[in-house]
Image (cartoon, rainbow, N blue to C red):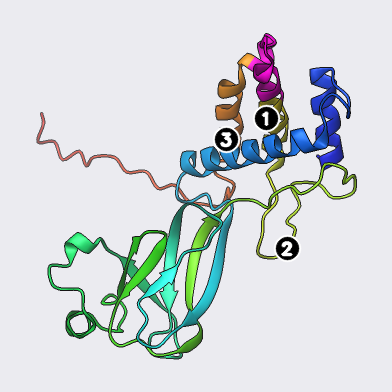
Amino acid sequence: MKPLELATYIRFKTKTTTTTFTDAEMLPLVNFRQDELSRRLITSLSSDEDYFLTPQTTDLIADQRDYALPKNLLARIKRVEAKLDGENFIRLLPMDINEYRYVNDEDTIISYFSNDEGYAKYDMMRRSLNIYSGAITSVTGGLKIWAYEYPATITTLTNNTTDIEDDPTTTTYGFPRELHELLARGVIIDFKESMEKPIPLTEREAKFEYDLKLAINSLRNADSNREIIATVPVDNGEEY
């Protein structure tokens, strides 16, 4: 669905016009609902469904352990890698600061962690990532964070050429087609409930939560090549 199609559909369902429901009024509602649906999608799917997952790189700075997380972060990060030896990425393991029993100064951290795979870790706090490892040296693009991000903000409702499911760039995401109607329906609900005398919802609008669960379920198991290996208990006759 293109932005203009989305706006036209919303106005058709709300019996409004560009005068009685302007783009300036509608656009914030569209983006609020898009963010809400994106959060619901990510928190409802399993960790194997990587909608909105983007690897981002930043520079490692000598002796710096604290790195800001992406501003557009949605819900969680999935993986962290770093070139602690200056050349090769290794995976940093997650930890909680409560697991580290010692003081948090540089000398002590270096004495209890290293730059080897399995011995370098990270902790998250205050929307930043803290690295626990051996000494950190400056490396261009030396930190890679795999993070779930919100899809691109819709900036105009007059665009009639680009679908909102299209990725705007190689590092930003569009919004899944399976949720387009629900995005529109959410805005319609918001409009009706905003009236001084709220407008009653239709039967379909009242089924928003139910239909959202169905739509999210339709996005599960996108890769049909995954193997599911089942096991059954060994019957050795001892129960008889």
Q: Is residue 56 magenta?
A: no
To which residue does mark 1 refer? 182
To which residue does mark 2 refer? 169
Q: Residue furthest front?
A: 196
Q: Which residues are magenta?
A: 188-205
Measure the alpha-carbon separation of dots 1 and 2: 24 Å
Sequence-wise, the earlier of marks 3 and 1 is 1
* Element under disc 2: loop
* Element under disc 3: helix
Measure the alpha-carbon separation of dots 3 and 1: 11 Å
**Amino acid type of the residue that numbered disc 2 sits on in the rendered structure:** Thr
In this rendering, the count of numbered labels is 3
Q: Which mark is residue 216?
A: 3
Is residue 216 shown above or below 73?
above
Q: Quadrant of the N terminus?
A: top right
Q: Residue 217: in sight, yes or no?
A: yes
The quarter of the picture where residue 189 lies is top right
Q: Which mark is residue 101?
A: none
**Amino acid type of the residue that numbered disc 1 sits on in the rendered structure:** Leu
